[in-house]
Image (spheres, grey):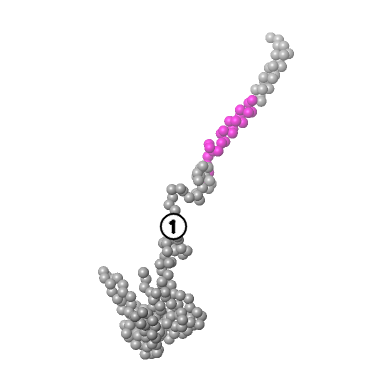
Amino acid sequence: MVTSPTHRRRLRVAALLLAAAAPLTACGSETRAGSASDAPRDDTSPQASRSPSAPSPSAPSPSAPGASPYVEPGVVDGAPHNGENNAYRRPGEMSSADKKAALAEAARIKPVLKRLWQQKEWDPDQVRAALTGELGYEVRETTSGGELLGGELDVQEMYERYEDGGNITPEGAMIGLYVGDDACVTAFVQKTNYEVRATGRFMETGCIEPPTGH
């Protein structure tokens, strides 16, 4: 069969068009096979388990409960106002001169309390008699309205506490010695131990260490 020149030109054009269309079809198939939605995920990647549409883990959830509006620094359990509630147990500041004087008085008191403890004499009356008789302190006296009449030494019984189903007053004595304008010697002696230290004054109890709880 004899083909005309015009017919042969049409066949060549058709062949060229088919040849050009084949790579385009292959390229489209390759792109789909390698798309992000079908590709296997690497579980070691930090982005592997996060959907592109998921919110950032740092963003708070609208339904999550809010944090406490007040958390003080250093409070382990986050209890609000814990520091404020225990402010009465923190001693005040001491001037350098009064601190030095309080440390000197603490050094005088410590051996007396050590001896009383070794002799098992921790009754408040015994402790008071030793500190006034041996060291020359005067018992602090005030009016019913709290006005100071004189003296610098407070000695009192231990704080009452709850134990074995009832309230008891443990054996022992608490000591507070007022030194200068803002310092104290705060001490105690009881069956198990004794302690003497120089501190500032407590907000509510002066030179006697306040009880725990309020």
Q: Is residue 171 above or below residue 69?
A: below
Image coordinates of residue 166 in percent, x first then y, are: 26, 70
Res. 189 in view? no
Q: For the residue marked with disc 1, what is the amino acid?
A: Ser
Q: Is residue 36 in the magenta section?
A: yes
The answer, for residue 137, to whether it is visible in the render is yes
User: Who's the residue at 44% across and 74% down the image?
Assistant: 91
Provide the residue span drawn in magenta. Answer: 21-44
Look at 34% across and 84% down and name the residue there: 127
Task: Estimate how packed mark 1 is, as few (under 14), some (14 to 19) or many (20 or more) residues with alpha carbons within 10 Å.
Answer: few
Q: Nearer the viewer, residue 60 or 197?
A: 60
110 lies left or right of 15: left
Task: State the quadrant of the N terminus.
Answer: top right
Quadrant of the image occupied by residue 20: top right
Q: Quadrant of residue 153?
A: bottom left
The mark total stands at 1
Question: In percent of the image, x 33 and y 82: which residue is there?
Answer: 124
Is 88 magenta? The answer is no
The image position of residue 108, as x and y in percent, is 43, 86
101 lies above or below 91: below
Identified at 48% across, 76% down, the residue is: 93
Q: Is label 1 in a helix, a strand or a loop?
A: loop
Q: Nearer the viewer, residue 93 or 159?
A: 93
Q: Which residue is mark 1?
A: 68
Q: Is residue 146 above or below residue 73?
A: below
165 lies above or below 181: above
Q: Residue furthest front?
A: 145
> Residue 104: percent from the left, percent from the top?
46, 85
